[in-house]
Image (cartoon, coloured by chain):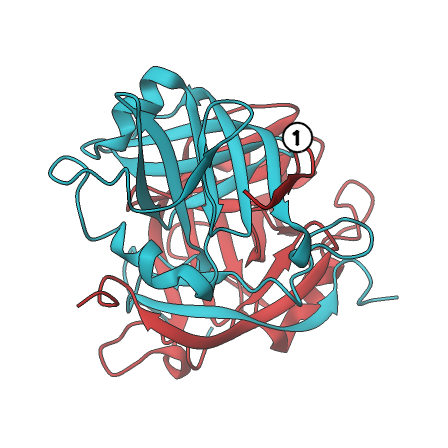
Chain colours: A cyan, B red
Amino acid sequence: MSKKNIGATLALYPCPIIVVGAMVNGKPTWTLVAHAGTMAHSHLMVSLVQAHYINQGIRENKKLSVNVVDESWLKDADRMGTISGNKVDKSNAFAWTMGENGAPLIDEAKVSIECEVDGNYELEHFDHFICKILATYAEESVLNEKGKIDYHTFKPVLFEFPTYEYFVTGEKVGDCAKMNQ
Amino acid sequence: MSKKNIGATLALYPCPIIVVGAMVNGKPTWTLVAHAGTMAHSHLMVSLVQAHYINQGIRENKKLSVNVVDESWLKDADRMGTISGNKVDKSNAFAWTMGENGAPLIDEAKVSIECEVDGNYELEHFDHFICKILATYAEESVLNEKGKIDYHTFKPVLFEFPTYEYFVTGEKVGDCAKMNQ
């Protein structure tokens, strides 16, 4: 093997960057999250340091939104990772709409997922909210003729931890499960 | 809000596609996985249908590797998602090297992460293995001068579920936490 052991380093990248939204004390708040993942075909896992302001709202209301970031609002999304909800009221950071299930959705986001928390795997001062997907909202402009999200049109921004850079989704290189036919 | 509710649809994409490796009955086996995520700064979550052959090895040995796919071996990786370890011996599918901790690593993969399972969040006939990162192996060719993975050089392949396509990592569009300075 020609690989070198570079230590126990985070390397599952690049991954989609999201802004998580939730209601805290009757107002929306937002935070930038890089570490999340799909579970089964019904849930999302969102990894959030417990000290974040937003966590108390998620614990209380059990509702959150996952707003997928594209380049059109990347700068605003990035800001949500640099200011603390414990110090700053972020309720006016975005134009937003209440989802059908009680989670605030960012209007600028072309794709937003509304979730209900039904578990929390706590690990090393992080909450890992296990979230059932209740509804997925998408702009018509990013849907194909079958009503599915078209990643030729919608280009999410991706994050990597090693050098803290953002990359955009690139070009298509294959069809899953068809490359060996 | 200009978005339309398209139902409770998976939409946290595109995400890195990986081949998970583990020993089963003394031989390596492999499977293609799209749904995984970083937890805290120390762990990965890997979502795998319980019927997969590989799950028994992961449960027994508690060791697995996460091999990040790039275009150079995408076709071979894709094949691991189309054949079942319950029916076919996959032990010769890749040249591999045993990791320092007992998980088989794919030689072709430029980045492989060796993990130990320390939890399982079972949900809807899926195992969600909570894996502590023990070691990360990377080819020198994908490391920058500081020894970190360089995603300008290393371009992982990304998957999206709605239309089952693969995309490659695109170009840099920003520096995290610096866009509002």
Q: Position of residue A85 (x, y in %)?
A: 19, 38
Q: Is residue A9 visible?
A: no
In the displayed structure, B141 sits above or below A72; it is: below
Furthest toward the right, the residue is A181
The amino acid at mark 1 is: Gln
Q: Is residue A83 visible?
A: yes
Judge by depth and name the residue closer to the eye, B116 or B148.
B148
State left or right for residue B95 relative to residue A36.
right
Judge by depth and name the residue closer to the eye, A39 or B117.
A39
Name which residue lies at 29% across and 72% down: B148
Label 1, residues with CA under 10 Å away: few <14, some 14-19, many ≥20:
some
In the picture, the quarter occupied by the C terminus of chain A is bottom right
Q: Position of residue A177 (x, y in %)?
A: 79, 58
Judge by depth and name the residue closer to the eye, B125 or A4.
B125
Q: Position of residue B80 (x, y in %)?
A: 71, 56
In the displayed structure, B87 sits above or below A108; it is: above
Q: Which residue is mark 1?
A: B50
Q: Quadrant of residue B158?
A: bottom right
Q: Position of residue A11 (x, y in %)?
A: 39, 59
Q: Quadrant of residue B91?
A: bottom right
Q: Provide the secondary structure element on which disc 1 rests.
A: loop
Pointer 1 indicates a residue of which chain? B
